[in-house]
Amino acid sequence: LTDGRTPEEVKQQWQQEQMDKQRISWILKELENLEGIFSVVNYFKRKKLYKELQGLMTKQNTQSANDASNAN
């Protein structure tokens, strides 16, 4: 059931995934708030947020693939 991991490790992974999902949600809201506002500062802020979002999404996709391979 836990792929050989301790219940604490499973809990920590679940908590990290929840924090990542919350961060993704926050980033998307921030990007919406910056929509249509054109300035150099906002450009760099959007660029930073998109990069962070890409990293989080890649991390989640990797975890999903690992979970699927562990289930087999």
Image: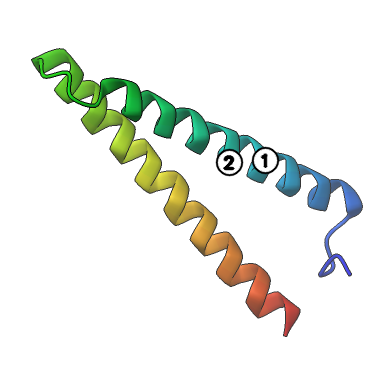
CA neighbours of label 1 inside 10 A, class few (<14), some (14 to 19), many (20+): few
State the scheme by which the image is colored: rainbow
Task: Say which of 43 and 48 sits in front.
Answer: 43
- Tell me whether circle 2 and circle 1 mark residues in contact (CB < 8 Å): yes
Q: For the point 41% across and 34% down, which residue is it?
A: 28
Per the image, the residue denoted by label 1 is 18
Question: Image quarter for residue 64?
Answer: bottom right
Q: Is residue 14 left or right of residue 5?
A: left
Residue 10 lies left or right of residue 44; in this view the side is: right
Q: Residues within 10 Å of mark 2 (few under 14, many from 20)?
A: some
- Please name the residue shown 71% across and 76% down the image: 70
> Residue 31: horizontal and vertical position, in percent?
32, 29
- Label annotation for residue 41: none
Helix, strand or loop at disc 2?
helix
Q: Kindly identify which residue carries mark 2.
A: 21
Say which of 33 and 13 sits in front.
Answer: 33
Mark 1 residue type: Gln
Which structural element holds mark 1?
helix
- Please name whichever residue, 13 or 34, is drawn nearer the observer in this view of the structure: 34
Residue 24: image x %, image y %?
A: 49, 38
Instruction: Determine whether 58 is above or below 34 in the image.
Output: below
- What residue is drawn where x is 50% and y is 61%? 61
What is the residue that sits farthest to the front in this orientation? 36
In the picture provided, is 20 more to the left or to the right than 16? left
Residue 57 is situated, as x and y percent measured from the top left of the image, at: 45, 51
Cα separation between marks 2 and 1: 5 Å
Quadrant assignment, res 4: bottom right
